[in-house]
Image: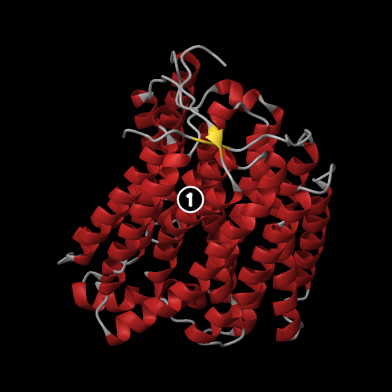
């Protein structure tokens, strides 16, 4: 072990591992639920607080801050330990929730949501990092099922709970609910994570690099959220934001090359497994997030479903992802050539997506739902394999950094995919039917279904292309043997 590393280890039994997993699953559920429970309450919030045109920023503000700080938490946890980092993330999230509940106007709520995102950005990536601390790579895949189950539960329960609270109680209750959940997450994190192995080392957090990366990310996401919505894509506002983001990214790259201890060590991305695995995961997660956002629009415009029915119609997408991730995760511990499962899954998903794109106007609804389930299951096989393969390819003390970087690029890939699908749907629809495009932007979804179907055909074709990119990077990723036989360890009591 390198001099200066601080590691205190004892044997962990299965009961202790499950207790640790239970604590981080609760923290992850806290962040995942907040991303879904707010959506159905937004119209009510807009009516009560006014400035309804700012409603999209309630989501965008959270997304921007959460995406920007995700890699910071990874590095922070490598320096100060997982437990302290997770306790910090949960605490900031709860403080942001309280600020949201007291919001007297829309601007206050948007700023409070951004504060929430500063905490929420660390919940999911830190949870995946902690799994890597207590489970060997060969056994790690099967625990990804817990993570997939969290997202499924949040995706199904969140919109329903949010709608019920907004209709029968008050929208602020949505944020007050986070207090007991956050308190329980803090208690479980403080008690159960004290047994975590300690792999942190005396590093420095690259503050200038972090500031440059955050500025670059914020400028890019602002451009993506405004392009085709508040301003045309070729407007000076959007082009200016993209140019500003490019300048910050160049400055960030120069900082990485010159900093004594950069925020994201360049040797990590010189690692072929990390480089290709992160890109494959970003393409796969981007497709999933894009479909999650636009499939309800597709159901409501092309099939004429209402909001409740379109939410129910999303179940095949969510269930398929959980089934695919669970299957691939469990098979990883049994297969030497673990890439074969996602290779087959992505190939089937691409085929199903192309069928949906070419026959979008002629397929019966039951077949559309079946194809969506097949697509999501195939794409779901990719996510646990990439996560475990990347963590397996780096040193133990770098797991937090590489997991945070992967989470950052996955969220950035989702934002890019949502923007791209929006541009395709609105652009294609605007060229064929400008009135329908204006109706879609304003939320009126009563235009000609045939017009919408044609626009979505191009969107589904683009999604198939992105999945093909994920498959290409997966094929290039080296298939290193998964480490096994490592005895999980636990830390001595942490005085912090």
x%, y% of residue 17? 56, 48
Q: Quick check: 200 above or below 417?
A: above
On the rendered image, what quadrant is the C terminus found in? top left
Q: Secondary structure at mark 1?
A: helix
Residue at 21% from the left image edge and 77% from the top image edge: 48
- 42 sits to left or right of 324: left
Location of residue 186 with respect to 193 vertically, above or below = below
**Percent x, y for residue 22?**
50, 56
Q: Is residue 391 above or below residue 296?
A: above
Residue name at image x 55 percent, y 28 percent = 398
Camera sees residue 127 = yes
Residue furthest left as drawn? 104
Which quarter of the figure has residue 299? Answer: bottom right
- Residue 46 or residue 210, whichever sits in front: 210
In the rendered view of the protein, which quadrant contains the N terminus?
A: top right
- Residue located 56% across and 52% down the image: 15
The residue closer to the viewer here, 367 or 164, is 164
Q: Which residue is mark 1?
A: 124
Where does the image place residue 310, in percent across and percent down from the top left?
Answer: 55, 81
Left or right position of 381 against 293? right
């Amino acid at each position: 072990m390198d001099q200066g590393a601080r590691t205190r280890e004892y044997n962990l039994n299965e009961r202790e591992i499950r207790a640790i997993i239970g604590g981080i699953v609760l923290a992850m559920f806290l962040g995942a639920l907040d991303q879904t429970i707010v959506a159905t309450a937004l119209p009510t919030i807009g009516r009560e607080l006014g400035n309804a045109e700012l409603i999209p920023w309630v989501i965008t503000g959270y997304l921007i801050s959460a995406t920007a700080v995700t890699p910071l938490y990874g590095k922070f946890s490598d320096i100060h330990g997982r437990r302290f980092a997770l306790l910090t993330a949960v605490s900031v999230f709860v403080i942001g929730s309280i600020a949201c509940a007291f919001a007297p106007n829309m601007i206050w709520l948007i700023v409070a949501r951004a504060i929430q995102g500063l905490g929420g950005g660390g919940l999911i990536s830190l949870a995946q990092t902690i799994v890597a601390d207590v489970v060997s790579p060969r056994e790690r895949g099967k625990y990804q099922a817990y993570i997939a189950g969290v997202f499924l539960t949040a995706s199904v329960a969140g919109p329903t709970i949010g709608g019920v609270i907004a209709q029968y109680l008050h929208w602020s209750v949505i944020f007050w609910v986070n207090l007991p959940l956050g308190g329980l997450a803090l208690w479980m994190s403080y008690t159960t994570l004290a047994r975590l192995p300690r792999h942190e080392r005396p590093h420095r957090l690259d503050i200038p690099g972090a500031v440059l990366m955050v500025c670059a990310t914020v400028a890019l996401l602002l451009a993506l959220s405004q392009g085709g919505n508040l301003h045309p894509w070729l407007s000076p506002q959007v082009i200016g934001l993209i140019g500003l983001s490019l300048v910050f990214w160049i400055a960030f790259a120069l900082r990485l090359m010159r900093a004594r201890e950069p925020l994201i060590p360049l040797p990590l991305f010189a690692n072929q497994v990390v480089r290709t695995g992160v890109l494959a995961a970003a393409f796969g997660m981007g497709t999933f997030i894009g479909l999650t956002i636009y499939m309800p629009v597709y159901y409501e415009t092309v099939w004429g479903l209402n909001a409740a029915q379109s939410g129910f119609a999303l179940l095949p997408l969510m269930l398929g992802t959980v089934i695919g991730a669970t299957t691939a995760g469990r098979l990883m511990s049994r297969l030497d050539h673990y890439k074969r499962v996602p290779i087959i899954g992505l190939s089937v998903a691409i085929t199903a997506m192309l069928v949906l794109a070419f026959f979008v106007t002629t397929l019966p609804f039951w077949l559309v739902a079946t194809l969506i389930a097949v697509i999501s299951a195939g794409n779901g096989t990719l996510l646990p394999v990439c996560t475990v393969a990347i963590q397996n390819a780096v040193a133990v003390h770098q797991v937090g950094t590489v997991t945070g970087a992967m989470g950052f690029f996955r969220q950035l890939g989702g934002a890019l995919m949502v923007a791209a699908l929006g541009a395709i749907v609105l652009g294609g629809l605007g060229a064929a039917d400008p009135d329908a495009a204006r109706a879609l932007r304003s939320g009126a979804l009563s235009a000609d279904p045939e017009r919408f179907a044609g626009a979505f055909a191009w969107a589904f074709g683009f999604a198939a292309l992105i999945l093909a990119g994920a498959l290409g990077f997966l094929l290039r990723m080296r298939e290193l043997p998964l480490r096994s036989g490592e005895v999980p360890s636990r830390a001595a009591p942490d005085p912090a």
